[in-house]
Amino acid sequence: MSSFDERERAFENKYAHQEKYDFEVEARCCKLFGLWVAAQIGLGGADAMTYATSVVEANLEEAGFGDVLRKVRKDLDDKAIEISEHMLNVELEKALKEAQRQISEGTR
C-alpha cells in the first residue's frame, strides 16, 4: 500500500470520527436544552425526557439549531411562557458546551 493510500485512509477515518462526534454532541446538546425547556414548561420525570427527545428529533429537520429554536419558541408560546430569544440562545450555548464536555469525557 502506498503512503498516499495510507494518508487517504487516515484522512477518511479522521473525517468519519469527527462527523460521529459532531452528531453525538448535537444530539446531546438538544437533549440537555430540551430538558431545560421542559423544566421551564413545568414537566418532570418521564414527561421531561419525552419532551427532550422531541427536541432532539426536531433538530433532524435542517442543519443548525434554527429548527430547535422554532420548536421550543412555539411550545413556550403555547404555554404563555415568556423567555427572550437571547435567553434561549444563552441556554442553548450552555447546553452545547456541556454536551461537548460530556462527549469528550465519555460521560453519559
Image (tube, rainbow, N blue to C red):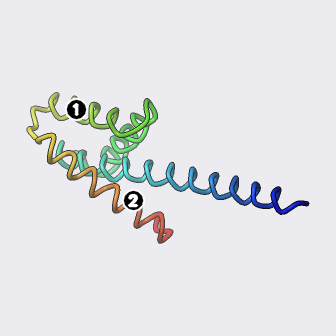
Task: Write the residue at 10% across / 37% down.
Answer: 81
Query: Does 81 sit left or right of 58 as displayed?
Result: left
Query: Does 26 sit left or right of 19 as displayed?
Result: left
Q: Nearer the viewer, residue 9 or 23?
A: 9
Secondary structure at numbered mark 2: helix
Q: Position of residue 65 (x, y in %)?
A: 35, 39
How many marks are shown on the rendered structure? 2
Quarter-of-image position of residue 99: bottom left
Q: Nearer the viewer, residue 35 or 95?
A: 95
Task: Write the residue at 57% across / 55% down.
Answer: 18
Which amino acid, by three-letter code, is at mark 2? Ala
Task: Write the residue at 43% across / 30% down.
Answer: 61
> Residue 99: which numbered mark, if any?
2
Q: Is residue 37 above or below residue 71?
A: below
Q: Position of residue 8 (x, y in %)?
A: 75, 54
The residue wearing badge 1 is 75
Q: Position of residue 85 (x, y in %)?
A: 15, 40
Secondary structure at numbered mark 1: helix
First-in-chain label (1 vs 2): 1
Task: Write the residue at 17% across / 35% down.
Answer: 76
Q: Nearer the viewer, residue 17 or 1?
A: 1
Which quarter of the image is occupied by the N terminus? Answer: bottom right
